Amino acid sequence: QIQRALRSLSIPLERLHVMKGQMMKDMCKGLSRQTHTQAKVQMLPTYICSTPNGTEKGNFLVVELCQNQVRTLLVTLYGDGNMSPHMVYKIFDMPESIRQGEGEALFDFIAQCVSQFLAETFSSDTSKSEERLPLGFVFPFSCRQMQLDKAELLSWSKGFSCRGVVGNDVVQLLQSAINKQKVGVKGTGNNWLSPWKGRKSSQFIPGQLSHVDVVAVMNDTVGTMMTCSMEGRPCEVAIVAGETWAPCVPWWWVLGGPVLVLTPIALADKGSNCCFMAEAYLVETAEETSGRMCVNTEWGCFGDDGTLNDVFTPYDECVDKESYNPGEKRFEKMVGTLYLGEIVRHALIALTAEKVIFTGANVAVLKEKGVFTTQHVLEIVNNEEGITDVRRILEALGLQPSERDCGRVQQICQAVVGRSATLHATGLAAILSYMCQTRDLETLMVNVGVEGELYSGYPRFEEILTSVSRLLAPECMATLLPSRDGSGRGAAMVTAVALRLAAQRREVNAVLAPLQLSRADLDKVQALMREEMDRGLCKETNATASVRMLPTYVTHTPDGTEQGDFLALDLGGTNFRVLVVRVTAEGVSMASEIYVIPAAIMQGTGEALFDHIIDCIIDFQTKQKLVTDMLPLGFTFSFPCQQVGLDKALLLTWTKGFSASGCVGQDVVQLLRDAARRKQHLGMQVVALVNDTVGTMMACGYDDPKCEIGLIVGTGTNACYMEEMRNVGTVEGDQGRMCINMEWGAFGDNGCLDHLFTHFDKVVDETTINPGKQRFEKLISGMYLGEIVRQILMVMTEKQLLFQGKITPKLQTRNIFQTKFLSTIEQYGLPLRQIRAILNELELEASFEDSVLLREVCQTVSLRAAQLCAAGLAAVVEKMRENRGVDQLSVTVGVDGTLYKLHPCFSHNLQKTLKELAPNCNVTFMLSEDGSGKGAALVAAVASRAASATQ
Ligand code: ADP
Ligand code: MG
């Protein structure tokens, strides 16, 4: 029978594996916005997003509210890796009446404790009272935390029931009580109520509470994690196993010598809990999405949905039934130090009834709830050598054990405590595996802070915790660190970190502020764009407008009736391509081939270049068996041209490495036709020269007749749209519409956007091949965003905000930070490890905070780009709406460009901003596939359709 009892208390390894999985599932449930209300493991966000890095410095005040005490603590940190903080504390007893009185009285009492403590602590050194004194508030009740310094009380427990507190922010309540103290002290000199009535006012320094700011509120469990973090060794998990006892320098240290005492700090409820640093985006119940946040698991309620029923022994059931909250906190009732003695007691009662132990002896004492404490259990367990101590303990309780009884009681105690340690290890394994998975790691190395009476009072606890968690989570390597000074010091660390981060935050904000655009800024950009558009369209002002508004001679978008085979050429993009596009009633199909243009030809004569192009076309048509037909050809030519007809465009200048002679100033279409004649190639007829924005609009226009705008956000940025002919002053005729190639990348080249240019933008502009040109584009497109980010990183590093102030030669290299990095870094939920990998490639040693800040920089730069692009588009759609005299315009934008397509937030930010800036326009975005191929063919098709219509 004794074996059976022992067996029921030992949980097989396979079951622990299953339990670990259940715990992980419950953790996910607790973090998810949809399911967290039903989760048993509550996973409360703490808004603690950073662990100490050892540079924290200064005085920090902590107030801890406990069951019947208020504990005040002053911690001085020296920026020395937090190796040797100086701590002074004082504990105040709290009258029972306060716990059940008015909330205001409670917080007044706390504020008075603080005032008293400071008066005594600082009386010998008044100079310190000039400093601002940050305060961390340990408030161990169930709260809905909204910020580090904002937590609404959900419900009282532990014998508290003060009125008017539930639903209110306890930080505010404490701060106003403190502020009241300040006024009181100043006003009357001695406004002290009980319990200090009658003290001499000379003992207090008037007004010193005016320096106290409550900057953080926290539960008690997070403290452990924070105390274990040392320089270079962040601790990211903490387990509290039972009541914690912390050595602490008492407040009279200042007066007498150093005395080390053991003082119970925190955890009046002897609970078991765990907290860890989770990826912030997974904590859906908090707003924070960047970096990590400490989550208080509150794992004590694990199993309240029945998952642990099969491992619950009859003894556990009895304990549960007799508890004040039957059916709740099932996990805690198996592991918590409040219950271990009770489990043993019920096991002994059962075994006595079965006449396995204490046969014939009087065991009435076992009926008494709580007679067996965890201390008893631990003492019995720890006396492995002899049983004399066991006998002494049992006899002291009023039992008369035989030698065999002593041995068996000891076995039971070992089983109960061992099970608790094993279950702690199972929970830890769940957390470690979860961290490993969500950080996308193959192996996890992590420091785990541990404290509590089980840890300190049971030598095998550490061994079991390590070995069992290793078995259950073999991919994780946990190093256990004893927490040294309890939650008080931890609270000081939280406060110190908060302050360090706040100071850093102010500096970061100052650096990024010029890049953040207000609604007014965007309205202004929109208005300026509109002005420039009008100037570009008007014949008289066109020459001086920064937005050139080039006519394209494309007067119709596809109507879906186009049919036939068309050729397309794409010259000036990343590759030179020849395509055949087959447009049928069923849709569009394409075949294409990439051809190489050797550098010698790019830089040779124009004749040789266009001959080579014709050779490629002939080769392509031969391969595609299209030689016998004469196919219309659309020519996407991505170089600046002055277009004078659909099939007539004068090359203004070569770019992108081309310099073929005899072309500038010539009609490019004619050059191509001349080459065809020389090669006697009759299989094609050039009908249109197309800009890539136009191609994009046309390609989308085939599928959506409402597509009357084309937008490119790739290496550069540009847009086109259908304008009324009556508004196009640079082309004869007033009938119908024409597509206008805006060339909006040059918007601002006349200086009208100078007010938006930051230091970073100016530096980037100066290092380009065309300083002062394409100003709008330089704020938006893929060629520049990475460079802007790099400039910001350099400035932030100089300001010691990043990379510990170390600028590497790589970071100083131009274009090393590619725009595609922004896409990767801004991906929602990207593990920080991957950001660090990018930075490591740049030879930058990035901390996890560096990664978070880098992401913010990228987000700022890409958001501004998207917003500016939206302001430009808003001007376009609003003009189209006006042109057509409608209240509401429905229009589609065909879009191309890798930045738009691959960046995770650009398109969303663009669309959202556009909606705000042009609320009367209903704008749909459509991704173009191969605008320069399909689009060019469709321009040719539409032109052939229009031509046959007029014949
Ligand atoms: P182009 O504009 O020359 O026709 P693309 O539209 O493909 O070519 O754009 C290329 C540009 O897109 C590159 O110069 C680069 O700056 C940017 N880019 C490339 N990959 C990404 C990415 N993953 N996310 C954002 N931008 C990218
Ligand atoms: Mg392109």
Image: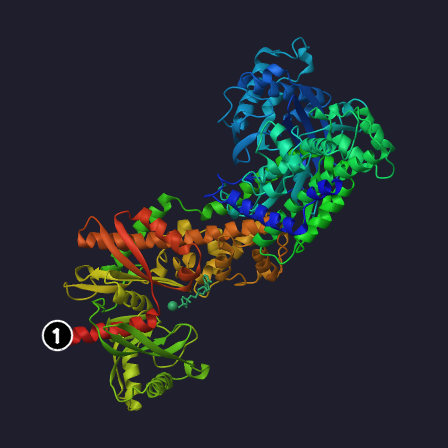
Vertically, is 766 above or below 617? above
Ligand number 1: quarter of image:
bottom left
Q: How is the image coloured?
A: rainbow
| The image quarter in which residue 117 lies | top right
Q: Position of residue 688 (x, y in %)?
A: 26, 75
Q: Is residue 489 visible?
A: no
For residue 582, say whether it is visible.
Answer: yes
Quarter of the image where the C terminus is located: bottom left
Q: In which quarter of the view is residue 96 placed?
A: top right
Residue 662 screen position, x and y as percent: 35, 81
- The quarter in which the N terminus is drawn is top right
Q: Is residue 574 above or below residue 56?
A: below
- Please tell me how many numbered marks the rendered image carries: 1
Identify which residue is drawn at 23% across, 66% down. Answer: 557
Where is residue 929 drawn, in percent x and y?
35, 68
User: Which residue of the protein is positioned furthest toward the left in this rendering?
Assistant: 951
The answer to whether the beta carbon of the residue marked 1 is less than 8 Å from any atom of ligand 2 is no
Q: Which of the pair 865/394 is nearer the observer?
A: 394
Rendered image quadrant of residue 650: bottom left
Residue assigned mark 1: 950
Q: Is residue 358 left or right of residue 693?
A: right
Element at label 1: helix
Residue at image position (36%, 76%) is 571
Horizontal side of 807 relative to 611 (left or right) equals right
Q: Amino acid at mark 1?
A: Thr
Category of crowding for the residue at label 1, using alpha-carbon neighbours closer than 10 angstroms: few (below 14), some (14–19), many (at least 20): few
Q: In this rendering, is residue 509 above or below 646?
A: above
Q: Position of residue 209 (x, y in %)?
A: 61, 22
